[in-house]
Amino acid sequence: MIIVYMCYGSAHSSVVAASIHIGLLPIDRVPTYEEIVSLPHYDKTSNDEIGTLFYMGKDEFGNYVYIVGARNGREIVTKAIYSFLSLYGISEKDILVVDALPTIGLTTKIGGITSRRLGIIFLGRPITVYGILKKYNNFVKLVTDIKTKLQIRS
Amino acid sequence: MKVVYYSYYGCYSSPICAYLHLNDKSKIEKEEFFKIPFLFQVDYGQMRFIGKDNNQNEVFIIGMKNFSENIKKTLCDLMEVFKIKEDIIFIDTSHYDVIFFKVLMNLRGKKILTQTIDNFLYNYYLMRHKNIKRFVERYKKIL
């Protein structure tokens, strides 16, 4: 199965959620600043890359985990993905799209705009990490819920 | 091959173009115009099948708002992930959409204005029907 974590720009929330999912980040404690910034694709995706699917890794069930950015069109993009793939007989049993954006708060959003849109990385990046650490429990809950859902399905 | 006509709303210019793709006619008559599948039916992100052309290409329409570049990129990447080998062509018809379409759709919802708005939208098509036809024909030749 393919699991796609989706957020605005595939730079912060989707990266963190996908990393927890594949075991790059812990679920029993809040990670350190270094653990977050060293994640693949963290705070790196450029504007042109929004919409590109990035592979993050494989989870313990053998599912392939990806991230993608959809700006403010997450609902439309999700619908397009499901309706398009259904033309090829690929159903929600084969792909799960998860909106990771609701996990973050205003702090990460401000940090994300500062770093990605304004290009002030030295200022924006630490703010995004601070925001994520503050809301880390939301990410753990999201991933745990998804994994429970996957276990029920299988 | 899949041919996907898309626009912001996916329920005006794209169904018209898809209909012309499947029906070889230079002008759509008024009665027929309002029978075009999915005309005025907003459903963003939903891929809707219109029919098969003479070359067995499947013709679809979709409304993508301003996220067309995102969606196309994501769908193409997913085709690679799922090893889907079929060719797909996305054709942007937004330049044949009507400005303030959403406002017109809201007004169309009022019974008293439905006919006026319908007439306007049909006349708008008539004004551009030659260009729309040429546009569709050009793509049909490429396929």
Image (cartoon, rainbow, N blue to C red):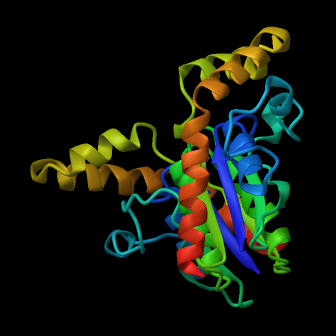
The answer to whether any part of residue B26 appears in the image is no
- In-front residue for pair A13/B67: A13
Rendered residue at 64%/37% (across/down):
A8
Rendered residue at 56%/50% (across/down):
A142
The answer to whether any part of residue A102 appears in the image is yes
* Image coordinates for residue A135, horizontal then vertical, percent: 57, 30
* Image coordinates for residue A151, horizontal then vertical, percent: 59, 74
- In-front residue for pair B42/A87: A87
Rendered residue at 82%/47% (across/down):
A24
Q: Which quadrant is the C terminus of chain A positioned in?
A: bottom right
* Image coordinates for residue B56, horizontal then vertical, percent: 71, 90
Q: Which quadrant is the N terminus of chain A positioned in?
A: bottom right
Rendered residue at 89%/33% (across/down):
A38
Give the left or right position of residue A52, taking residue B33 as reference: right
Q: State the residue lying farthest toward the front.
A: A28
Give the left or right position of residue B4, taking residue B113 as reference: right
Q: State the count of labels.
A: 0
Give the left or right position of residue B15, taking residue B32 as reference: right
- Depicted A119 relative to depicted A93: above or below: above
- In-front residue for pair B39/B42: B42
Q: State the residue lying farthest toward the left.
A: B112
- In-front residue for pair A66/A69: A66
- Depicted A134 relative to depicted A2: above or below: above
* Image coordinates for residue B74, horizontal then vertical, percent: 74, 56
Give the left or right position of residue A90, taking residue A49 as reference: left
